[in-house]
Amino acid sequence: MVRYKSRLLEWWFAICTVGFGLWLSLPVESMSTGAFEDLTRWLDEREWAFLFGITGFAHSISLYVNGRRWWTPFSRTLMLVVNSMCYGLFALGFALTYWPTTATFTYGVMILGAAFICIFRAVKDCVHAVEVYRA
């Protein structure tokens, strides 16, 4: 069994995604302004809540099992990509509605930038896992 280093940034990313899903599931309308026009055309608020909640939960599970089998870095990488795509959709929705909004920068640059750092590390772990498996 290969143990990988602590993935603090990635754990933060996964847990915040669960939290974002829970936040969107609160019994209030948080996506009712015009800034969410394109996003709510794609999915309603409850569907976004489910998407983020289940993605964050699955990402957390992939982190928990990471290192227990040789192939687990691949599941972790897959969940990172899926999680990043969810935030990428959010960034795209804001950009299409009104691109200069701060949400475009927050979701598109800050969050996805952190996600790409995590993906880079996860891919390195995948390469290492294959090397160990073949040895």
Image: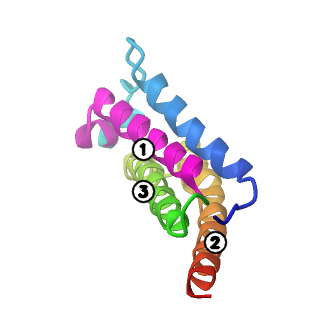
The residue beneath circle 1 is: 55
Mark with earlier residue (2, 3): 3
Q: In the figure, residue 112 lies in which quadrant?
A: bottom right
Taking the magenta stretch, the answer to whether it contains residue 56 is yes
Please name which of the two marks, 2 or 1, marks the residue nearer to the observer: 2
Q: Amino acid at mark 3?
A: Val
Magenta-tinted stretch? 39-66
The residue beneath circle 2 is: 125
Secondary structure that dominates the magenta span: helix
Q: In the figure, residue 19 lies in which quadrant?
A: top right
Mark with earlier residue (3, 1): 1
Q: Is residue 104 above or below residue 48?
A: below
Taking the magenta stretch, the answer to whether it contains residue 51 is yes
Marks 2 and 3 sit apart, C-alpha to C-alpha, by: 18 Å
Q: Amino acid at mark 1?
A: Thr
Q: Nearer the viewer, residue 2 or 113?
A: 2
Provide the secondary structure element on which disc 1 rests: helix
Marks 2 and 1 sit apart, C-alpha to C-alpha, by: 21 Å
Residue 68 in the image, given as x and y percentages of width and height: 58, 58
Q: Residue at x 60, y 64 (%)?
A: 116
Q: Report the quarter where the N terminus lies.
A: bottom right
Q: Residues within 10 Å of mark 3 (few under 14, many from 20)?
A: some
Mark with earlier residue (2, 1): 1
The residue beneath circle 3 is: 82
For the residues bearing labels 3 and 1, Cβ distance under 8 angstroms: yes
Q: Is residue 103 above or below residue 134?
A: above
Q: Is residue 91 above or below residue 34?
A: below
Provide the secondary structure element on which disc 3 rests: helix
